[in-house]
Image (tube, helix red, strand yellow):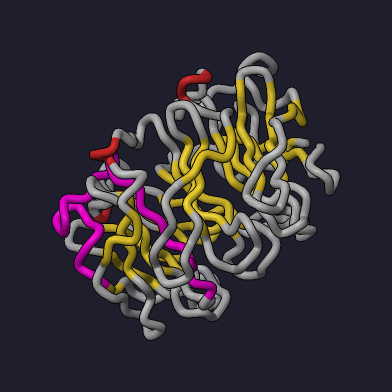
Amino acid sequence: MRCTSPFSGFKWLNYFLAPTAHSGTADIICFGLTGVSIVRNSFDVQKREALQSFAYNASWRVDRHVRLLADTTGDKRLDIVGFGDPGVWVSRNNGDNTFGPPKLVIRDFAYEAGGWLVARHPRFMADIRNTGRADIVGFADSGVFVSLNNGDGTFAPSKLGLGNFRYSGGWRAEKHLRFLADFIGNGSLDIIGFGNQDVYVAYNNGDGTFQPAKEVLTFFCYDQGWRIAEHPRFVVDMTGDGKPDLVGFADDGVYVAFNNGDATFRGPCRVSDEFCRNKGGWVAQKHPRIIADLTGNGCGDIVGFGDAGVYVAINNGYGTF
């Protein structure tokens, strides 16, 4: 299904799919030249400029500054978080299509505060303790560092949470994807990494630290031909059971490894032959593909930004489309 696209004529530098106003249905959030804009999920799609910050014209750069969306206050609204030069900035969601002015919340995890580089050090905003508020997680040279949310808009000093998935251990941003997800349904986010040969999971201890990583699947990895520049991969619930599955866009289609519920996975199966290089000429450099729940049923749908517009494949409810 192809949707009407409000993006014609615009040069978007960075964008996400996430629910910013109503939980369960994803909107499109765009970081452009002059500011942040939101395209609400509706049949009469309209673009609204929400904030004149975090933009290219305000000296933010894709190759230097990470920008994310996260609930930092526990009000169930996504705020804008930017990893700038001196530290991490947050603009709180006002709930009316606008955001408050950016505030510096911690002098760390940044280009000039700790030497964090986009090309080497992935960073995330994630509620790793099930408090309802996002913490900061960064993959540094020496390991995974965590800054816990204090609950008042500030963050505690960063601490080493795990000495794995690190740059000095051979993990590379251009080769090895890393995500955070609750694999066993206990409310705490675990770490998953797509290594050279295997997919690894490190269980969360519940206090901002993690257990040593262990292998859970031999697929979706670099040595099997998967490339970040060519094959998008995601960790998302595809069946509505509350436990994340592994999804990969290969040359010949979309593959899913379903979660058994204990952080082990079934062998991957192909669920769609669309959105791929071999059918339709989809390539990562031109055609972003994202998994997001567009209908509110708890199952991930496929969204692809093709040559002619935005295409959607709705999940049947059990991992097929």
Q: Residue at x 42, y 65 (%)?
A: 80
- Where is residue 139? Give x, y as percent: 32, 50
Task: Using the image as rendered, state which of residue 184 and residue 32 is in the foreground.
Answer: 184
Q: Is residue 318 magenta?
A: no
- Where is residue 284? Give x, y as percent: 51, 27
Q: Is residue 119 magenta?
A: yes
* Residue at the extreme bottom of the image, as rendered: 152
The quarter of the rendered structure image containing the C terminus is top right
Quarter of the view holding residue 47? bottom right
Does residue 221 appear to the left or right of 109 in the view shown? right
The stretch in magenta equals: 106-130
The quarter of the rendered structure image containing the N terminus is top right
Q: Is residue 226 above or below residue 188?
A: above
Q: Main secondary structure of the magenta part?
A: loop
Q: Residue at x 54, y 66 (%)?
A: 188
Q: Is residue 202 above or below residue 170?
A: below
Q: Is residue 313 above or below residue 31?
A: above
- Where is residue 159? Give x, y as percent: 27, 66
Task: Using the image as rendered, state which of residue 56 and residue 285 is in the foreground.
Answer: 285
Does residue 165 appear to the left or right of 204 in the view shown? left
Asked if one can make out residue 127 in the rendered structure from this viewpoint, the answer is yes
Quarter of the view holding residue 275? top right
Q: Residue at x 42, y 75 (%)?
A: 92
- Where is residue 137? Give x, y as percent: 37, 59
